[in-house]
Amino acid sequence: MIMDNLAQYIIDSALFILKGGILTVELYFVTILFSIPLGICFALMKISRYKLLREITGFYTWVFRGTPLLLQLFFTYYGLAVVGITLQPFSAAAITFVVNYTAYLTEIYRAGIESIDRGQHEAAHALNMNYFQTMRRIILPQAVRRTIPPTCNEAINLVKDTALVSVIGMSDLLISAKEIFARDFVIIPFIIAAVIYLVITTVIVYFFRKIEARYSIY
Amino acid sequence: MQMLKAENIIKSFGSHRVLNSVSLEINKGEVIAVIGPSGSGKSTLLRCFNGLEEIDSGMILIENETFSCKEPGMKDTVKHGAKRAMQKKIGMVFQNFNLFPHRTVLENIIEAPVTVNKMNKKEAVQMAELLLEKVGLADKKNSYPSKISGGQKQRVAIARALGMNPDIMLFDEPTSALDPELTGEVLKTMTDLAREKMTMFVVTHEMRFAAEIADRIIFMDDGIILADDKPDKILTSPDHFRIKSFIEKVGQ
Ligand SMILES: Nc1ncnc2c1ncn2[C@@H]1O[C@H](COP(=O)(O)OP(=O)(O)OP(=O)(O)O)[C@@H](O)[C@H]1O
Ligand SMILES: [Mg+2]
């Protein structure tokens, strides 16, 4: 009987916590969807032969990798409101996360692109391929493959970073767990939250492994 | 018939003058072997011919069309687009093959014909298969470069360059990265190509290839062409002691 009650309690709590996490899942996908392609574009800008582009992107990654994500979140949500730009918590979080993660991915992809042997560029040049064809067909496919592991790391960090959104009043998994804790004063909700995080990161790692396997045919 | 002409090419890296007023002519169907000590500017000269290096001054003509024309400190008079169009006539084979590792042998060959020349993919595959047959690698078409030997890689690289239908092929030490027992198959492919009257400009240390296949040997030393003559002349009775001692050294 007690066991039945416990099972029911866990299920109810888990559902409540998961419901709290829905918004952060959306945030997660928005961030991934935008920051990977943007990171590739910015990486290309950061190694472009135009000094201005290099300097702009250099400044950008310097600022956003050099300040806490939490501060950036405050800035977008509270700071911008002061100058008359009010954003919904979700929009503020999405913008901040995309901008922040793009900065990290920019550096990852820059390093990946630069790690490709000069000979690949030269061979493409000798075959009369232009810059765009060379990047798209020759350099980026190889660079992206090499950057799968660090990208996976960022994808896992992102899961954990989404917990920060509670500071701008968004509900998330962790906050919901804390609500249950405050009400019942038991440790179970935190354990449930931990399990959910672990399941999510495991799925992500699995997903990246699959991609890596698909790429490692050569 | 003239294929390529270089006039007074000067090229420096920083304060180091690597090409010091180099002039030469390559006729259609000719095979030229370029020899000379390390650092004499052989690779640099060859790379200037397809735009991998920019010359400081001088002139390069390809089939009597200006490919590059530069006064010291001035801009090249030939526009980038025009250069690219002419560069299509020039194939290149590298010492380190530089095959695309993420593409199969066949895909390596059809890549540029399809993306650059917009060739129909089916036609490109047919052409690639013919080229692979020619270099004796028809059975490797679906292999990735990492799965074939160095000699096979270089033959694929030759087939890949031929896929763009060049009028002249530049080779930069095509056998130097190979184990001795694998150089033969590459040299044979190059010999076949020479027999078909492909114009070839080959930087090499293979004296036998130079002696037997080349129509002319160019000897470079310290940024200049020290000699440009028939193989037997250069190999048996060179005018210059530098050439003599070089040939004695590599001949060992
Ligand atoms: N990108 C570069 N930057 C600076 N110096 C260079 C560069 N490329 C070549 N050099 C220098 O120019 C000189 C000529 O080089 P090059 O590669 O043309 O010689 P090489 O005759 O091909 O020699 P090797 O037989 O060793 O290949 C060398 O001293 C080399 O160090
Ligand atoms: Mg060289």
Image: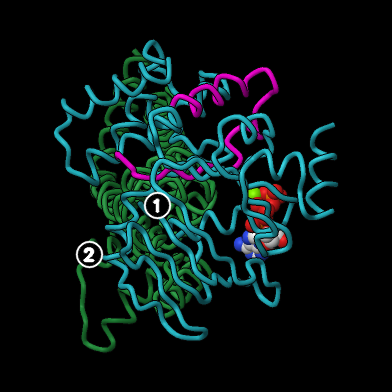
The stretch in magenta equals: B165-192
* Callout 2 secondary element: helix
- Residue A34 within the segment the image draws in magenta: no
Q: Which residue is the extreme one toward the bottom?
A: A83
Residue B26: x %, y % from top left: 46, 52
What chain does mark 1 sit on? A
Q: Chain B's shade in the image?
A: cyan
What sort of colour scheme is used for the picture? Answer: by chain
What chain does mark 2 sit on? A
Residue carrying label 1:
A125
Q: Quadrant of residue A143?
A: top left
Local crowd size for mark 2, using a 10 Å CA cut-off: few (<14), some (14–19), many (≥20): some
Residue carrying label 2:
A91
Q: Residue at x 43, y 29 (%)?
A: B193
Q: Residue at x 46, y 42 (%)?
A: B30
Residue B41: x %, y % from top left: 65, 58
Query: Foreground residue, A16 or A67?
Result: A67
